[in-house]
């Protein structure tokens, strides 16, 4: 797919160099992250998609777009050696520390060290100047805030020590407002929206930010007008069709409820003052990053 | 006193004798994100309760989804769930994570001086929530207590929506390994040097071949002296209650390997969910376990009969309907038909994939896409569908 000509660094949708994509498991978070990265590359930006531990879902969603987007999979052991190495001034010492069997278990129990090391690697990527847009696909089971508060927590807890100072630096480079943005992916389902609400609330309280974008995924098209009236009319008719019609009414009502749920999701997004709210359609098969990027383009003015 | 106790208000009569005579059966539900695991776990629990089994459903998921699905509240005790047919046999337990961490510390440390020291430790305050596996440990503690109580015929555990959901099963054992590591004793000894009340934790001679001072210097360089002191103190306190960890590890292992404990993998016909299901099958196998069944959601075999019958009725004969209404209905029904077909194809592919990866003879239970938005209505519909599938609970 040909790249478009270079556009100015800031596009309408995103403004910060690091974008964290968050949302509960199964909402299509990785697909949206891959799409954002691909869309950035189409606008002439050097884009990276960052995942942790297992890059299988990112690879699957990127598909052909992999040739345009740097797919970076961060693995914990290596990230830890890199991070400790930068603190100690030598990777050799870090490697020795981490591979020592007794110390290894100790290190693995240090709270939040995993999140810290990963964010340090994101910081290194940002500082390398190799990318204009770094899209981070945060793990589904984690809570975005539990990640993003770690560098500052380390800074507070470890004071002026090398690791504490590093925490401050990581926060300033890749977490602070202006340096990073958060995209929240949700579904038009009450349970998922509630969880999204809690997340946005914490974002505001703990980081003092609002989501740059809320994506409401798998939005179903409403049924054509008139179907409901037709079935209601059938339910008044002779018994052989009335029972089926009434059952069908229940189904149509539930489908109609989904339209309400979508409205609720949008209402939520507006109430948390997200910069943009975008619906993405329900697709019969898992859509690719390129397809989702096209949908995003349609929804957000270029 | 540990707050892990239970209120049994609202308990109705069970139609079977108390569990102590029969033992408590544990069902662990695992699955990737977005497959409907929480609602399916609740549906299983409801089905069991409908059979008169006194059932507790526990979720590790801190997002309150289960509470909402069952119309109940987060609480420190098992809460009764009043859903159609439950008849007082169904209860839910949903730990609140911050409160539970403090509860867990209360359970772990009986000495109030030690407890206060832990809770005041900056390492605990800042990062306690992030301590690897802490939510999972809390759930295990809770699970253990409920099973030991003998109150329940059935306990259904809804795990985190992740392919790594099983990792929590091994936490007590891994932590025990950590607590028994020489390095930790060394670290605890550092704390004892600083705190005279911990004098009994003096290091043994020849503890650490590296040379204690060298390792101390490196750790001090990384985290700073203050950080080192706080971390040491925290680990020192954990080491001192090593026996409690050991007990927890042993009993958890026993519970998970009990022949009556069963593992259900919950999936849906999407690429991500099937990849997660495959991962979980291999993960279970690496522990010497296998799934007793795989539940495939959104995978109805037949579309609802009413849709086909109404479509036939209005295509054969206009039935006195306004033309535009009739057309809208036909378009809607054809669209729904197509949705069913696509889901059916996806389900078919998913089942083929599952047959390739799951141990021979693993049954696959197909549950339908439920056309309801109200979570408790979804739970009831799934329970009805489970019953209709005829599969053994």
Image: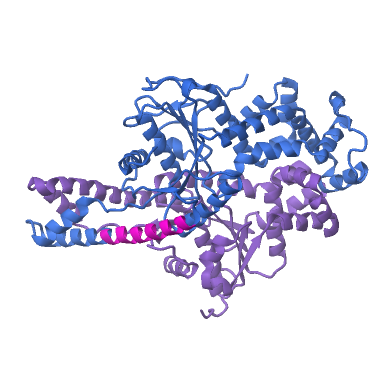
Residue B349 sits inside the magenta stretch: yes
* Residue that appears at 18% across and 57% down: A226
Q: Is residue B32 above or below residue A293?
A: above
Q: Is residue B264 above or below residue B99?
A: below
Confirm whether residue A276 shows in the render: no
Identify the colour of chain A in the image.
purple
**Left or right position of B387 against A249:** right
Residue A67 in the image: x percent, y percent?
58, 75
Residue B334 in the image: x percent, y percent?
23, 61
Q: Nearer the viewer, residue A300 or A32?
A: A32
Residue A298 sits inside the magenta stretch: no
**Left or right position of A67 against A221:** right
Q: Which residues are magenta?
A: B337-356
Residue A103 in the image: x percent, y percent?
80, 45
* Residue that appears at 73% across and 38% down: B177
Q: Is residue A69 above or below residue B135?
A: below
Confirm whether residue B268 shows in the render: yes
Q: Quadrant of residue B335?
A: bottom left
Q: Which chain is blue?
A: B
Q: Quadrant of residue B117?
A: top right
Q: Nearer the viewer, residue B128 or A9?
A: B128
């Amino acid at each position: 797919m040909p790249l478009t000509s270079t556009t100015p660094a800031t596009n309408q949708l995103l403004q910060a160099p690091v974008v964290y994509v968050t949302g509960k498991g199964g909402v299509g978070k990785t697909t949206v992250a891959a799409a954002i990265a691909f869309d950035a590359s189409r606008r002439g930006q050097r884009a990276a998609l960052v995942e942790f531990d297992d890059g299988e879902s990112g690879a699957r969603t990127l598909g052909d777009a992999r040739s345009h987007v740097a797919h970076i999979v961060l693995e914990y052991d290596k990230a830890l050696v890199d991070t400790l190495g930068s603190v100690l001034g030598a990777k050799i010492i870090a490697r020795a520390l981490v591979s020592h069997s007794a110390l290894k278990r100790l290190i693995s129990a240090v709270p939040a060290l995993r999140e810290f090391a990963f964010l340090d690697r994101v910081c290194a990527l940002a500082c390398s100047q190799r990318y204009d847009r770094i899209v981070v696909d945060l793990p589904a089971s984690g809570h975005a805030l539990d990640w993003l508060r770690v560098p500052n927590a380390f800074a507070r807890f470890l004071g002026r020590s090398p690791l504490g100072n590093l925490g401050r630096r990581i926060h300033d480079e890749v977490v602070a407002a202006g340096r990073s943005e958060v995209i929240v992916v949700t579904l038009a389902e009450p349970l998922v929206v509630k969880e999204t609400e809690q997340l946005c609330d914490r974002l505001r309280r703990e980081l003092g930010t609002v989501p740059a974008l809320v994506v409401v995924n798998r939005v179903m098209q409403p049924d054509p007008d008139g179907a409901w009236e037709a079935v209601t009319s059938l339910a008044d008719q002779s018994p052989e069709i009335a029972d089926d019609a009434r059952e069908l009414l229940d189904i149509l009502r539930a489908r109609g409820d989904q339209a309400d749920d979508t409205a609720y999701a949008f209402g939520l997004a507006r109430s948390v003052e997200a910069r943009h709210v975008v619906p993405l359609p329900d697709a019969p098969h898992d859509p690719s990053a390129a397809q989702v990027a096209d949908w995003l383009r349609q929804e957000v003015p270029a | 006193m540990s707050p892990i106790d239970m209120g049994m208000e609202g308990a109705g009569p069970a139609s079977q004798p108390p569990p102590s005579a029969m033992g408590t059966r544990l069902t662990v539900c695992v699955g990737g994100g977005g497959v409907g695991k929480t609602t399916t776990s609740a549906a299983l629990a409801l089905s069991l309760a409908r059979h008169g089994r006194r059932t507790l459903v526990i979720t590790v998921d801190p997002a309150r989804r289960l509470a909402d699905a069952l119309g109940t509240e987060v609480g420190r005790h098992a809460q009764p769930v009043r859903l159609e047919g439950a008849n007082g046999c169904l209860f839910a337990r949903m730990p609140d994570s911050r409160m539970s961490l403090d509860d867990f510390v209360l359970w772990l440390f009986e000495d109030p001086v030690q407890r206060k020291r832990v809770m005041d430790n900056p390492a605990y305050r800042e990062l306690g929530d992030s301590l690897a596996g802490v939510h999972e440990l809390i759930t295990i503690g809770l699970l253990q207590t409920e099973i030991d109580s003998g109150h329940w015929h059935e306990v259904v555990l809804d795990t985190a929506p992740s392919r790594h959901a099983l990792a929590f099963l091994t936490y007590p054992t891994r932590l025990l390994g950590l607590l028994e590591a020489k390095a930790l004793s060394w670290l605890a000894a550092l704390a004892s040097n600083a705190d005279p009340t911990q004098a009994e934790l003096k290091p043994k001679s020849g503890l650490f071949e590296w040379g204690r001072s060298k390792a101390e210097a490196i750790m001090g360089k990384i985290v700073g002296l203050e950080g080192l002191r706080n971390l040491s103190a925290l680990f020192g306190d954990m080491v001192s209650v090593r026996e409690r960890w050991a007990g927890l590890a042993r009993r958890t292992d026993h519970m998970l390997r009990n022949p009556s404990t069963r593992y259900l993998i919950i999936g849906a016909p999407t690429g991500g969910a099937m990849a997660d299901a495959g991962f979980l099958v291999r993960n279970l196998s690496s522990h010497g376990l296998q799934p007793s069944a795989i539940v495939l959601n959104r995978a109805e075999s037949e579309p609802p009969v009413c849709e086909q019958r109404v479509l036939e009725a209005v295509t054969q004969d206009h039935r006195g309907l306004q033309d535009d209404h009739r057309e809208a209905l036909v378009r809607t029904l054809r669209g729904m038909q197509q949705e069913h077909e696509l889901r059916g194809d996806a389900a078919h592919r998913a089942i083929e994939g599952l047959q390739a990866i799951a141990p021979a003879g693993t049954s696959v239970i197909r549950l339908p896409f439920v056309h309801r938005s109200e979570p408790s209505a979804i739970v009831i519909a799934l329970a009805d569908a489970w019953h209709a599938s005829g599969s053994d609970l």
